[in-house]
Image (tube, grey):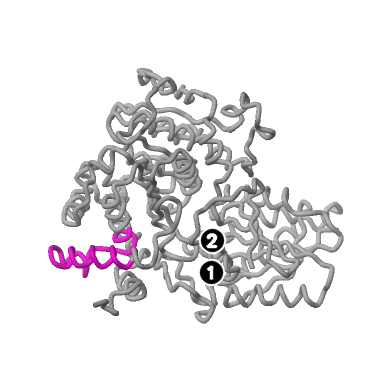
Amino acid sequence: MVNICRDYKSALRALNSLQSNSMALANSKKRLLKENRQQNAANEETMQLCEILGIDIEKLSKRAFHVAGTKGKGSTCSMVESMLRSHGYSTGLYTSPHLVTVRERIRLNGACISEEMFAYYFWLCWDLLEKSRSDYLSNHLNWFFYLTLLALKIFSDKNLDSAIIEVGIGGRIDYTNVLTSPAVCGITLLDYDHTNVLGTTIQEIAQEKAGILKPNTPVVTVEQQPEALKVILQKAKEINSPIFLSHPSVSLYTQSVPSLSDSSLGIKPEFMQRNACLSIALLDVWFQRSPTSKVTHTKCFPQYSLPLDNSLNVPFYPTFTLSSECINGLLTHHWPGRAHIVSMANHPICFYLDGAHTIQSMKLCIEWYSSCTRHLTQLKRILIFNVSKPRDPQALLTPVVQAIQTGLHFSQVYFTKSQLHPSRRKDGSNDLSYEQNTDEAWQVEQTKIWQDLVSFIKQRTGSNLTHQSVSWPSVQSSSTVDEVIGQIIDHSKSQPGVRYEVLVTGSLYLVGAVLELLNYPIDQVYETSDNSRTAKTQ
């Protein structure tokens, strides 16, 4: 007999009753300040909970990828997953945050786990913990911690060939760092984010990210700021972890493939090339170290001794010709919400979605949008923006204002909450991270920050005739995403022949709300045969 109180919706309610991610972040800061124990000891309690849940963490670790970083973690992990699946391996992918449904965070063979599987494993783990460690459910477990245990339990039970695990925040004391001996570790580009928890310098941030490194386990990282790379290299030396840099361009792996008309595989924008190269190197190491690998040769992974001096001459991972499976995996790979274009069916409206939420990411987002949008006379560009507290709206809006100043024209800017009206929500997932900016005062404050930035530039350039022709957009704050998009649709109906190109950025949760409103098929396997990374929705 089915227990109606233990379905998917009740699982979501129970999940949201746990400690919120905002509180967990505050506690993480306290842990960082007082944590003097060894890295493995910090995960002792997590290991105990894995034992209670029957998770064979040693077995799972040996076939796992563990990826930390500030930018590009999710896309790097999903590229690895796509190439593995193209090779015929079974895959488990754990990423965060989600865009529409919490089930996106846990994927089997490219697809979200079903509501039924989520509910089954949620309550299975809940009962086991309640029976053995009821104090954890009531006092210690938080939202992200529980989902991490849930993902590890599913991946362990399914006996998958591979598990690709993205770090939540930081690395050293992240709950995913329970992995004892992964096949390979990766570190994507480091930047300033979560500075209230990880530290305010790039060295402090690098120290936390490098905390995922394990003795004798190879690590591959993208090219970093010298200060950050020095920290990662020092950690690698301390634990005898071979370290390599990934290359910046996929063409280094595909230029000798005569059947390809585009050696970049259509991977755009350029920063996605960097993530793709990291995923290629990580996969090659995994092929040679995982007990589930079917690859019999080991010609690519070099024998490398760490330098004894203090130089930063970290070697690049060797290049080689990509297999047809890897090429197919990258050609069909798609990662929603990052450099993502969605055309709205039945309306002349195109959305450019990118969850950029650091200064450097915002600069790259603006460059990408500028390169994609068309130069039509009957065209209106619109910006929909929101940023999560405690991030600084002024820092993220400055690149946008500067782009307008130098020629990128927007007709309208909207500041809105990263949510839909409750009647519009279809799944009911509620990420209780510190993206809880539900008060309209925050949107009003961001609007004022924008206006102050524009006023400052006008005053500074008032005597400069070259800036007199700058046309600044109208600005409006709104309570929900669906209200904003409804206004855009109404405008398009009243102005036939005008095309609207809408940039949505500042928050992945904002991007997720737009995708949910557009009925984007988020549950399906993330892949496309369209190299432009453009998707259409009804």
Q: Where does the magenta region start and end?
A: 119-147
Res 115 → quadrant: bottom left
Residue denoted by label 2: 507
Q: Is residue 518 magenta?
A: no
Point 64% across, 45% down: residue = 531
Horizontal and vertical percent position of residue 177: 30, 46
Residue at image coords 69%, 57%: 401
Give the quarter of the figure containing the C terminus: bottom right
Q: Is residue 191 visible?
A: no
Percent x, y for residue 397?
62, 58
Residue 361, position in %: x, y? Answer: 57, 49
Q: Is residue 39 left or right of residue 377?
A: left
Per the image, the residue denoted by label 1 is 418
Q: Main secondary structure of the magenta part?
A: helix
Based on the picture, tell me whether residue 140 belongs to the magenta stretch.
Answer: yes
Q: Nearer the viewer, residue 246 or 280?
A: 280
Q: Quadrant of the N terminus?
A: bottom left
Q: Are marks 1 and 2 in contact (CB under 8 Å)?
A: yes
